[in-house]
Image: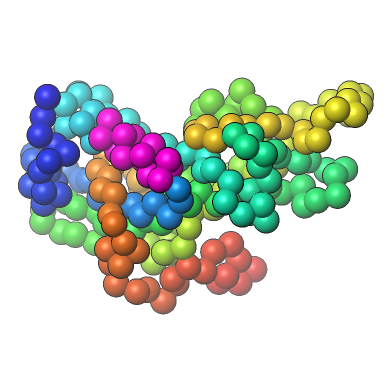
Amino acid sequence: MSTLVQSQPSQILTQLLKKYDKIMYVKLFVAGTNNLKTMYYAAVDRHNNNLLNNKYMDAGFDLFLPENEDPNEIDAWGETIRFFGTGWNTNPVNKVDFKVKCSAQMYCDTGKIFNTGYYMYPRSSISKTKLRLANSVGIIDSGYRGNLIGMFDIVNIDKNIQNKDMDADYYAKVNDRLLQICAPGLVPIYVEIVDSVYDLGNDTERGSGGFGSTGN
């Protein structure tokens, strides 16, 4: 077993750049509950060790559905998250705040380092659900420092089913993985969890402005 987790990021990146010509270095701040932080610490450990020790690296880093802290942000009852289609007295596009903030830099074997944007793609397993990412692919600008947000709509609803006991069109569970972070060109991703939003880097002009904040 490597000592990847115990090493300093600079040492890890130097080691990885002997294997790959580019690495996207993601700093991730978990703004959710302690349970969510525990999930991410374990996931980062697995992801980074796989990156160093295995020949075939993962193309993305998965995001977890967080626990409900504010009913206005996620419509959840206990461990169940409800998603609604059209016909309910609610917005048919379902907003999920993933309770994580990120910054990303591209490290190159030439020594060049630059801030980079990245993508949020649906995981392939989303095809087993009734959910679809409403904007198809999330393009995250390099200067964005707000929480990562997913906007989902419902597909393949059987309108002939009238179940009065149902109070939503689809139910997901806390810690389900629907989306993943991917780097430009699907280059390998090294992830570090940081203790503060200030560890993500300097303030940017974009800041926490999210969907539509730069205009239509």
At 80% from the left and 51% from the top, the residue drawn is: 90
Q: Decide: is 70 above or below 144.
A: above
- Give the left or right position of residue 82, taking residue 61 as reference: right
Give the number of marks. Answer: 0
* Residue 73 on the magenta segment: no
Answer whether residue 57 is visible to the viewer in this image.
yes
Which image quarter is the N terminus in?
A: top left
Q: Decide: is 66 above or below 166.
A: below
- Give the left or right position of residue 21, taking residue 201 as reference: left
Instruction: Return the x and y of residue 208 as percentages of the image width and height.
Output: 48, 68
Instruction: Return the x and y of residue 201 as percentages of the image width and height.
Output: 28, 67
Answer whether residue 151 is visible to the viewer in this image.
no
Instruction: Please state the extent of the stretch shown in magenta in the rendering.
Output: 34-46
At 48% from the left and 58% from the top, the residue drawn is: 147
* Residue 40 on the magenta segment: yes
Q: Decide: is 214 above or below 157.
A: below
Which image quarter is the C terminus in?
A: bottom right
Q: How is the image coloured?
A: rainbow
- Give the left or right position of residue 149, taking residue 52 as reference: right
Hey, which quadrant is residue 159 in on the image?
top right
Instruction: Return the x and y of residue 73 as percentages of the image width and height.
Output: 63, 54
- Give the left or right position of residue 183, taking residue 6 as reference: right
At 61% from the left and 23% from the top, the residue drawn is: 128
At 39% from the left and 66% from the top, the residue drawn is: 143
Most common secondary structure along the magenta stretch? helix
